[in-house]
Every structure is written in C-alpha cells, then in structure tokens.
Image (cartoon, coloured by chain):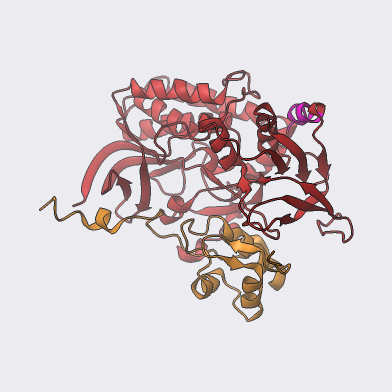
Chain colours: A red, B orange
Amino acid sequence: MILLINTDLLVIGGGPAGMTAALKAAKKGAEVIIVERYHELGGQLIKQTHRFFGSKNEQAGTRGIDIAQGLTKEIQNMSEIKVLTEATAQGYYEDKIVTVSYQNKFRKIRAKRIIIATGASEKMMLFLNNDLPGVYGAGAIQTLMNLYGILPGKKVIMVGSGNIGLIVSYQLLQAGVEVKAVIEADSEIGGYLVHASKIRRIGVPIYTGYSVKSAIGESFVKGAEIIKLDRNWQMIAGTERFIKADTICLAVGLRPLVSLLIQADCAMAYVPELGGDVPIRDENLKTTNDQIFVAGDAAGIEEATAAMLEGEIAGLKAATEIGYLSKDAITESRRLKKELRKLRNGPISRNIRKGLSKVRGDDNVKKNRYSHLR
Amino acid sequence: MVILMNEDKIVCRCEDITLKELRDMIADGYTRLDEIKRALRLGMGPCQGDICLEIAAREICRMTDKKMEDIKMPSKRPPVAGIKMSELVGDNQNEK
C-alpha cells in the first residue's frame, strides 16, 4: 500500500535552510511539505546553545536554539506548510517522485518543485583505535550535552580547531568538563580568533601542527598519543606525547549529504572548499535538474546564517516558478542575494568564495566524480 | 590489550574494514571504488559510504597517483536509509 501525496513544493530537511525555504514559499502562497528525519524541526540549530554572530542582519546575538524555536513556531502557524517529522526521504525516481518513510509506511510525494536541504555528515579521521568507545564526533557530543543534558566524559581532547571544535570546547568547559587540549593539524587555528581566545584564556592549550597518532585504551579511551606533523602533514617520529583523557572529540569537518541530488541526476562538482561533492547551481540555487533546488550545507559547508539566506532565495524562486507570482519577488530576491554576498565578503570567507566560483562555469565537467553514472 | 598494527586503523566503521584490507585490495589492482565496494562491502553499511568513501578515495589517490576529482564515485541508489520490509510491501494483516 503506497500512498501518493501531491504538493506544490517539497522541502527535504527541516534545518535552517529548509525552514526558511518553506516559510518563504508558503508566504507567497505555495503549498509546502517539509520532510524531517528528526522528531522536531531545527537541524543543527537545536544544539546551538551559543549566540550567533557574523552577520548583523541575520540573527546575530541570538542563540541557535532560539532561532530554531522562532522559525518552528512560525511554520506551525502557516496552514500552507505540512511538517512530517521522523520522516526519511528515501529516493528520487525518474518519474520525478520522491519516496519517504513515514509512520511505518512508504509514501510517494509528487511535487512541482523540490528543495533539497539535507545538511551534512561529519568527517571521520584515521588513527589507531579510532573505533574505541569514547571517540565521538563533535555533533554527537553536542547532541548528548546540549539536547539530552548528558556529559560525554570528564576529560576531553578536541581534535580540530575550526569554529565547531572551538565552540564545542567552550560548551564542554561551561558544562564542567575538562578540555585537556585542542589538536590542530594545520599550522594555524582554523576558527575565529574570538572563540580561540575564550578557551585559551581559560587555559586550554591549542597544539597546532599536531595530529592524533592513536587512541589509547583497551575497552574505552584512556588517552591519546598525539604527534607533531611536518610541513607536508607527515608524522615526525619521536615527537609523540601522551595526553590522558576519557573522550576524544573529532571536529575535523563536514561533508554535504548529496545522495538524493545524485539520484536526481543533478550535475555535481568536487569542491574541497565546500566540503566535497556539491551540485552545480545557478544564483537561485537551482540545480541542473529543473525541478530541484539545493540550500544550506548540502550545497556546501557554511554557517547557518548563509544556509538561512540560501533557503529564502531558493524558496522564493521555487514559489515563483510554481506560479505564485508577487510584485516584489524580484527586488526581494535581489536584496537576499546582496545580503548573502555581503555575508561572504570578509577575509574569513575567502575559501567559500573560491569554492563557489567552482560550482559555476564550464570546467566543472572535469570535476564531476559522478559523471560516469549519467 | 589488543595490539593493532599501524595499518589496522578502521576505515569503514559499519563493516569493520581496516586500512590494511583496503591497501591490500588496491595493491591487488582493485583501483576503482566500485570494485572495492563489491569486494570488501566498503560503504555498504548503514551510513552508505558517507563516512568511509572519502577516506578510501584518498587512499586510492595516494597509491595510484590520482587526483581526488578524478576518482569515480560509486552510484547512489534508493533507499537512502534502512527500511523495513513491511514498510515497502504494506502490512497485509491490517490492510487488504
């Protein structure tokens, strides 16, 4: 028994990008279904107990969890939006239908337009005993600590000094966990100086040019052996040092979740600056499949503020294409794009800009690691 | 304590495949991810390769002198996540 549901717009993923996309399209009159895997909307925002900063216009000074609650409430008040939680989009088929597992039934959804906002997964790292209990991803630690109020351990080694590594380190310290060290393979700290300063002031050492050689322990983590790297990121023998800890937290990057986009035959490009394989798209986030838009981390790893703007741009364009025309759509879209450009203007976004330049243009064909499937 | 060799790092957590197994495969001439997937079950567990395929791709690049963008990735097919048979075929006891 397979149920078929028709709708104007299907939004896959109820994180920051998916929520703003759905809201924007619904406000223009479109009938929207959001498919969300978790039991509530919000995506990564619901774990983000810290205040946002970056763009002054886009929710700076607000905690991620409050942004999620605000958007969720707004969505609940829109009769045009139907939210399916604990629902997993399972596949995209040639007849332009998406299948979804929901309430123990396999459903088919036929939408005039689809916005894929599936987010990202955490990258893993190769070191000895990396499967020992006590080795966590930073996302898992945030879920345990900030959603369920469970401490992951007492002494943590943080691997990765990007913003996630630094912020989660600070959250661990706030929760009373000892952060023994932050390990960074690069010669420089990856995240914002303001986050790094905060944890340095508390006395947490940050080892740049170091990596984890092995996790130490029999049935659970008792520490880690870290090792110095040379300029080519090769381990320098004899520079090992042992750090005692019961938890190793990996914050070594994210990778866009693009399975559905590949199934939908969207042309892809391998762009390391954006986290891996991402879909080629235009300035409205439309992919090479005319039915499909992308937004948020699935389009390339960035911060939630960028994801929210991308969602709005895609949602607005999708609504227009479905036929919900509004007088101000063009100026509104222009304003959103300008805001997004401004957000990506700083020196910190240099890599993002470089990555984005690769998702347009003709030389992409060479970088499509899925072209042989088309 | 179980002593692991340096190459016994886990590459694919879903299927417990080690770096040594992966390197042996590549050395044996299995230089396409698709082949390795079929031979080792790498990327065929619950995460469907979201975690291990990048690591495996990098290893192929290192051993065969290729660039990451030249690696051909295995196909992605539905279903994206695990699914119960009863979901697919329906529950015959309750529905006719």
Please give the range of residues in magenta: A192-200
Which secondary structure class fits the magenta region best?
A: helix
Most distant residue in the left direction: B96
Q: Is residue A196 magenta?
A: yes
Q: Is residue A223 left or right of residue B11?
A: right
Q: Residue at (46%, 53%) from the top-left corner?
A: A259
Q: Residue at (39%, 34%) from the top-left corner?
A: A318
Numbered-mark total: 0
- Whether residue A280 is visible, yes or no, is yes
Q: Is residue A214 left or right of residue A281?
A: right
Q: Residue at (62%, 80%) from the top-left corner?
A: B29
Q: Is residue A44 left or right of residue A243?
A: left
Q: Is residue B68 magenta?
A: no
Q: Is residue A131 left or right of residue A200?
A: left
Q: Quadrant of residue A198?
A: top right
Most distant residue in the bottom direction: B28
Looking at the picture, how far across and down is residue A11, in whole percent? 39, 38
Residue toward you, B84 or B66: B84
Residue toward you, A55 or B13: B13
A224 lies above or below A14: below
Most distant residue in the right direction: A238
Looking at the picture, how far across and down is residue A299, in whole percent? 53, 43
Looking at the picture, how far across and down is residue A43, in whole percent? 48, 35
Q: Residue at (70%, 58%) from the top-left corner?
A: A127
- Whether residue B65 is visible, yes or no, is no
Looking at the picture, how far across and down is residue A324, in whole percent? 32, 28
* Quarter of the figure that contains the C terminus of chain A: bottom left
